[in-house]
Image (cartoon, grey):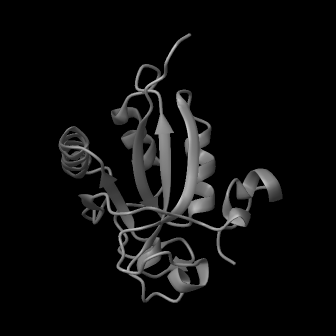
Amino acid sequence: MTTINLEKATFAAGCFWGVEEAFRKIKGVKDVIVGYVGGHTKHPTYEDVCGGKTGHAEAVHVLFDPKEVSYEVLLQAFWDMHDPTTANRQGPDVGEQYRSAIFFHSATQEIAARKSKETLDTSKKFNNPIVTEITKASPFYRAEEYHQRYFEKHGGGACHV
């Protein structure tokens, strides 16, 4: 019997439905859970987070097999799936809950995240500076069930409701 040692990564890149869908397509990603992280309210609801007073971001918690996909590959996917130069906004979604953030779970992840951000920023791929926050992971609160695998259940489309 083979034991798989999964690692976790947590990212916020705007509306969590599209971010979840994008990470699910990566080989080596075993599960993606949508939820809330980075704020001060315990056990927030979607309505709480959308109200903008919890400090939480809509985020994804990615469980991956590091033998199949590296954290660096996940970071690159993160950078490619959103605009990391807009503070508290992605497309039509506005508010701190839609901010760009990487929540690291280890010193190794922190180093990799900071290095990838610096490399991308100095590459001048974007006209504006990257505003993505990089912070230690705080408690992650799983979003309500109707948000899990949303696009799989309802089809793709716009993220805002």
The C terminus lies in quadrant: bottom right
Q: For residue 75, which quarter of the picture?
A: top left
* Vertical position of residue 57 compared to residue 16: above or below: below
| Left or right of 154, for residue 41 | left
Q: For residue 38, which quarter of the picture?
A: bottom left
Q: Residue at x 41, y 52 (%)?
A: 10
| Residue 7 visible within the image | yes
| Left or right of 23, for residue 40 | left
The location of residue 27, given as percent across then percent down, is 56, 27
Q: Residue at x 28, y 66 (%)?
A: 131
Q: How many marks?
A: 0
* Vertical position of residue 48 compared to residue 109: above or below: below
| Left or right of 91, for residue 133 | left
| Residue 81 visible within the image | no
The location of residue 59, given as percent across then percent down, is 48, 61
* Vertical position of residue 29 compared to residue 160: above or below: above
| Left or right of 25, for residue 55 | left
Q: Residue at x 42, y 55 (%)?
A: 11
Q: Farthest right residue?
A: 154
The N terminus lies in quadrant: top right
The location of residue 76, given as percent across then percent down, is 39, 40
The location of residue 109, given as percent across then percent down, is 26, 42
Q: Farthest top residue?
A: 1
Toward the viewer: 63 or 89? Answer: 63
